Image (spheres, rainbow, N blue to C red):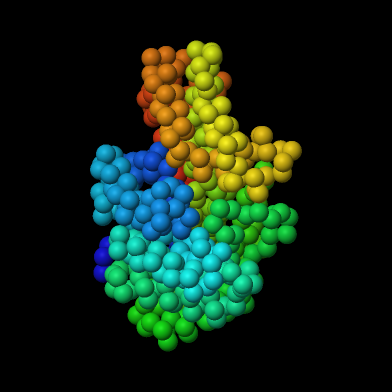
Amino acid sequence: MPDALSHLLSLARGVHDPAVAPGGRRGIASVCSAHPLVLEAALGRAARDGGWVLIEATCNQVNQEGGYTGMTPVDFRDLVWSIAGQVGCPRERIILGGDHLGPNPWRHLPADEAMACAGAMIEAYAAAGFVKLHLDASMGCAGEPSALADEIVAERAAALAARAEAVAPGQAVYIVGTEVPVPGGALEALDHLAPTAPQAARQTAGVTHAVFARVLSEDVWRRVLALVVQPGVEFGAEDVVFYHPEKAVGLIGALDDLPGLAFEAHSTDYQTVAGLRRLVEDGFAILKVGPALTFAMREALYGLDAIADVLAPGEKRLRAVMEAEMAADPSYWQAHYDAARAPFLRHYSYSDRIRYYWARPAARAAIEALFVRLAETGLPDPLLSQFLPRLYERVRLGHIPRHARSMVLVAIADVLDDYGQACVPEGAS
């Protein structure tokens, strides 16, 4: 069994292993971003500590038609591998995953057409060597209700798994269940958020198991790694719902009836380290994070942009470039933000809808121009203290290079360090 496959399955098995001491469960962070700086930070961290790094692309970001990044699965894989080579991260320590793989990008089409597109997508992911595949066929297509019965979702998920198995037999582990918002984040208010009901988790797993056994095999089902459920965590534009384990006691107990399965938690961004660690202890072996990484990147970039404005006022600022890009195409943020608060939320919300614009040529050029502008300034300590206080002391002591790009990478890595601390028991290597 390939090392990556074995490592992922061991995390799920560890949830049920009675030999694992209290406080000894392990997890893994899933880095859900296609931004090169985020990828570089994640891969660089793995190169330094020798650990595994799990990187996932979503169906909307990356698919056979290019997604909003313009990348196919092969393109994304090659980007990850290229950056890994630059930072010295061995390919064999990289696990590639696909998130929400299903008909979501084509749900405006009739179900047969949407599922045909989804099947082509998952074949492309499997052919490119992606190991962790989240099967998500929960959304209704044209003429269907928005939420589908478990039996229909399971049949469609099994059909997608069959396409992946036909291309790369035995290569993948699968994630099933979809008790989370659709790709892109929550639109609804968060004041009524509740963990998944235990019986709903059991039913989803049971129905899906039965369909997989009939359509595929028990061997394929044994490679179903985790069930996506809602532990009671989420974030919106301006607020975060923190993990309260006492509210998820019933859900956590349901794991006793799900042998071999762990839970996967989506939308764990902005949780505390203690909350993340408790999620791992409670059986959530996979913690997905994405917007918090690009949020940290944007904070660092805007801090550097403010420093550049002090040192050389009058130059066009990065923030102005991003504002122009978002104003010209509001499709990625307009439905998510209250109109009165949109001018502030476009740039600073936890939802981080600005992440959809960083790949655009004008944004990339503005970032590189900012780095060039700052290269000769010396980045004075008082301005670092003012605009990048989380990095200031480490720069001053020489722990971080006095270099703009390096500071952005460290800001992203700081978030990943929180996940690294949460996913490994205290005192373990």
- Residue under the image location 43 percent in, 71 percent down: 116
Identify the image quadrant of residue 18: bottom left
Where is 341 relative to 264, above or below? above
| Count of numbered tags | 0
Residue found at x 28% / y 39%: 87
Q: Is residue 226 visible?
A: no
Q: Does residue 290 appear left or right of residue 402 in this picture?
A: right
**Viewer can see residue 79:** yes
> Residue 19 at x, y = what percent?
41, 69
Task: Determine whether 374 is above or below 190 in the image.
Answer: above
What residue sits 45% from the left and 64% below the top? 101
Question: In the picture, which quadrant includes the N terminus?
Answer: bottom left
Where residue 314 sits: x, y (%)? 54, 14
The foreground one among 326 and 11 is 326
- Relative image position of residue 333 (x, y in whole percent): 61, 45
In the orientation shown, which residue stands out farthest toward the bottom?
214
Q: Nearer the viewer, residue 316 or 271?
A: 316
Rendered residue at 39%/21% (across/down): 372
Q: Position of residue 74 (x, y in %)?
A: 31, 55
Q: Is residue 369 above or below residue 322?
A: above
Frontmost residue, 18 versus 64: 64
Residue 339, relative to residue 71: is it above or below? above
366 displayed left or right of 233: left
